[in-house]
Amino acid sequence: MPLVAKSQIRTHYLCERQARRASHRVPRRGQGGAVAILAVAFIYLDLVIIGLALDLGSVYHRNLELQGIANSAAMAAVKELDGSTDGVNRATTAAANAANNSQLMYHSPYLRTNQIWQQAALQMAPSAEGPWQSAEASASAPATISFVRIDTALMDPSAGSVALTLLRLLPGSPSSVATSAHAIAGHTGLAITPLAICAMSPSAAAPRTNPGSPAKVELVEFGFRRGVSYDLMNLNPNGTAPANFAVDPITPAGGVGGAGYTDAASIGPYVCGGQLAIPSVMTAPIRVAQPFPLAALLTHLNTRFDQYGGTGCNANGAPPDRNIKAFSVTTNSYMSPRQTSQAAATILNGNRLSNISEPQPVPTGTTNTQYGALWTYTQAVAYSAYLPGHPEPNAGYALIDQSAWPALYNTGTSDIKWNWAQYFLSYQYLSGPNFQGPAADHRGVAKRRVLNLPLLACPVAGSNASARVLGIGRFFMTVPATATSLYAEFAGAVPEQRVVSRLELLQ
């Protein structure tokens, strides 16, 4: 190839390369501006994301604090409910103290005050589904109140207000947001044995005027006398045949249960433990079946006497009583003269299957050997101590003295006498002839021999039916149950809120 041609080709190549470089330089200047714009956009987006994370984190953290406050206030309140106006008032105070004294609240970086409680934040109800009402309304009708609800949105507004840090810089964004939490707490289990009997009277409290000077006016609750023993399998206020019932332990009051929930196999474990897995028996009718299968469940009842053979229950889930001594009138010289039966003798009082402790005057021919075991666990109380609408004080009612026995149980012949040192309130002894401890490896629990039983409005129609509970009676087992009899001393009526076995926080 000639030299001129090679030079021309080289010149052409160099010019073309320079032109190509020039063509690339102009667009790169425009693209650099776009990159700068995108960089600013990405930085702004990063700030938004960081701000969102920080501010939402603050809101989330504050919500957790409020939930803790709601939980602690709800649990503090529900522990105070006992069926009384005083209990409602104590619950209100406990909720306020729990909210205002919350450690979570004191360490909060968001609060401007440490007194956040407002009474509107507390509501109460008979069940977790309501109807909810104020504490003031609940105090006027406290008997069935078992649940509380706390709503922090109704406390001091500053409690849920969280100031925004970065998001507030965005156009149109608020400077703060509000968050809140709520909690429901209530009674979800009852220390009630799934055995029900009829109330011998619909009256929660009535006076019984016994002879003497001055007259001894005794408190009678639902037709039962404190300190008197009854055969719980042999009572009926509406007929001559015994009436007793197995209680469905898992179907809530007002619900519809199946017959299988009241058979011996289903309720056996609940009989051992003396428990119902429902929150209430007073708010609506409960499911019952009659009769109670005592022959199949007597061993379950007798776990309280440290007897576990064939029950499937054990001393961990169903511990024995700390005093398992059987107070049998036929084998022990508790009373003089010796009694002819373990409980007050059964009689027909009109068309009522009752016992000799009920009628006034005492039936002709009654002797002082027919009253059965008396005052092994508790004693008669004065009617004057009863205050309508208020549960029994924790300290108990005023007692009628032992010297009143001739008036309380006078048969028209001779007075009942007893060995003071060995008999009176036998269960309270923790040593001596009236005490017997359970096996060394079984931890005894005080008052396990006390059965809390629903007292029904009778008659109850049908073998598997609904029944209305008038009250809850306490009965102390004086001796182990047999296949036909369950002897127990009446120890008074008790509000449902005082037999709660489990408190639960419901979110």
Image: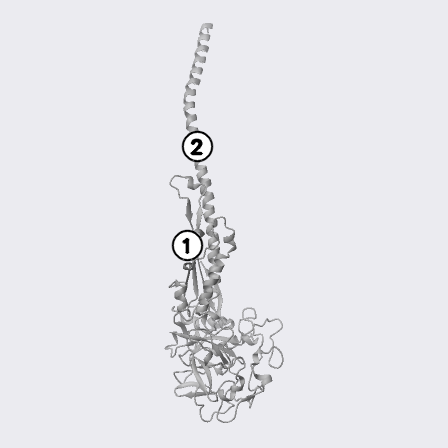
Q: Is residue 230 above or below residue 156?
A: below
| Residue type, mark 2 in image | Val
In this rendered view, identify the residue nearer to me: 217 or 199: 217
Q: Is residue 2 visible?
A: no
Q: Where is residue 282 shown, x and y percent of the image?
A: 41, 71
Residue 303, horizontal then vertical, whole percent: 54, 75
Rounded to the nearest whole Å, what is the CA distance between mark 1 and mark 2?
Answer: 40 Å
Instruction: Tell me if residue 161 comes above or below residue 72 in the rendering.
Output: above
Using a 10 Å C-alpha cutoff, classify the residue at mark 1 as few (fewer than 14 neighbours), some (14 to 19) or many (20 or more): many
Q: Which residue is mark 1?
A: 153
Give percent across and percent down for residue 433: 62, 82
The colour scheme used to paint the residues is: one colour
Q: Secondary structure at mark 2?
A: helix
Q: Relative to residue 470, is residue 313 drawn left or right?
A: right
Report which quarter residue 14 is drawn in. Answer: top left
> Which type of secondary structure does the marked residue at label 1 adopt?
helix
Q: Residues within 10 Å of mark 2 (few under 14, many from 20)?
A: few
Rendered position, 146 above or below 240:
above
Mark 2 lies on residue: 40
Q: Nearer the viewer, mark 1 or mark 2?
A: 1
